[in-house]
Amino acid sequence: MGLSKLGAYIRLHDERNTSNEIKKVLGVSVHKEFREPTAKVDRNNLHNYKIVRPGCFTSVQTTNNEKVFAFAYNDLGEPIVVSSVNLVFSVDERKIHPRWLQVYFNRSEFDRYARFNSWGSARETFTWDDICDIDIDLPPIEIQQNYVDIYNAMLANQKAYERTLDDLQVTAAGLLEKFKTDTPREPLGALTREVDDRNADLAISEVNGVKKEKLFMPSVASGADLSKYKLVKRHQFACNLMHVGRDVAVPIAMNTGEQAIIVSPAYMVFEVNTDDLIPEFLLSWLSRAETDRYAWFMSDTNVRSGMEKKRFLEIDVPIPEKKQQEALVEISATLMERRAYVDQLKEQIRNLCPVLIKGSLDEAAREEVLT
């Protein structure tokens, strides 16, 4: 072994989608995988986008926002296109197994390295030259393969579990679509009532916000008067109508816990006021992409691009039979459990990456001693 520069084993690509033939556009997430682009993309005008062939890498050149080296490896079995500002590169597979390099990049240790060696002010960058300048200790390709096999086995388990998610999502979407067309609807305002209970006794000190993914999240309320913050009790909803336009979604969540939580006094808090509607079913309906698009369309045009409460309460909600609602709720609960398990698997795989790299380096060192 021995340290060498990574640049000796990788090659930069700049193949453009000039024919506009490839329509699959993907971005790169901070979780080091491909994701759907957050911005609206004109798929009829992708001529300048870069092509990422199977077996190639793409990376984002900025590190300051999330303090990670954001990259993705194309194991999708088909070419895709990414932003023209991304880097696209391949490896010399005689010396480096692409999966081994993926594992190498996937460590938090490498994120710290990239963050430390990035440069700039408002936008810190980790460029192609910086990647090429990385000192890397390469085990023989056969040893790399041994540890890649372990990684691949874990990935295969994750992917198999994710396919069950796809099946459940299709089933849930089909039920919601059926309710949309076959079931009478009522406006949200007729099915719910707003509540305004405050944290007057300061019994709760931890503040929550609401994500566009329909979940609560920890929030910082430095110096705020928490006695004015609103309580959200079990099966009550909190909604941030101010950010509908910004998020292109309705940031809404339901408290499924036994204990009350508190949210910003600017949030709308409400609960179902009829026995004909199951709260979990309402959350599923409001979580549809179609509802998000409608809310975004109905948001105003000011700086925050919020949604008026009146408009929000005009959203139509179907009221199917209780058994049908319960069936959807059960599917949704199973879906959430399995999503959580997939996230757990991903975290386990990420935590294994440093172990795999160290194991491959240690095994190579032992072989050198023996020879």
Image (tube, rainbow, N blue to C red):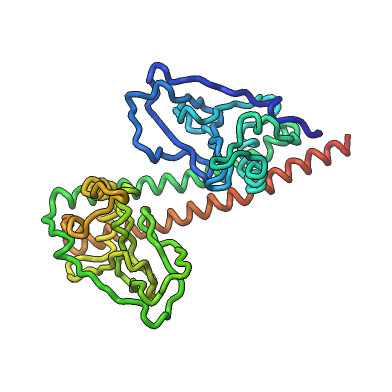
Q: Please name whichever residue, 333 or 313, is drawn nearer the observer in this view of the structure.
A: 313
Q: Please name whichever residue, 90 or 100, is drawn nearer the observer in this view of the structure.
A: 90
The reply to whether residue 46 is in sight is yes
Place of residue 28 in the rendered image (x, y in percent of width and height, measured from the top left): 49, 38
Q: Residue reaching furthest left? A: 184
Q: Is residue 236 left or right of residue 346?
A: left
Q: Quadrant of the N terminus?
A: top right
Q: Quadrant of the C terminus?
A: top right
Q: Is residue 180 above or below residue 232?
A: above
Place of residue 355 in the rendered image (x, y in percent of width and height, measured from the top left): 69, 48
Place of residue 365 in the rendered image (x, y in percent of width and height, measured from the top left): 82, 40
Where, by quadrant of the figure, is residue 63 drawn? top right
Where, by quadrant of the figure, is residue 196 drawn? bottom left
Q: Is residue 25 above or below residue 348?
A: above
Q: Is residue 277 above or below residue 93?
A: below
Q: Please name whichever residue, 286 or 332, is drawn nearer the observer in this view of the structure.
A: 286
Q: Residue reaching furthest bottom? A: 201
Q: Is residue 78 left or right of residue 140?
A: left
Residue name at image x 76 percent, y 41 percent: 361
Residue name at image x 21 percent, y 60 percent: 309
Place of residue 226 in the rendered image (x, y in percent of width and height, measured from the top left): 41, 74
The reply to whether residue 157 is in sight is no
Q: Is residue 151 left or right of residue 305?
A: right
Residue name at image x 43 percent, y 22 percent: 48
Q: Residue reaching furthest top? A: 19
Residue name at image x 65 percent, y 26 percent: 10
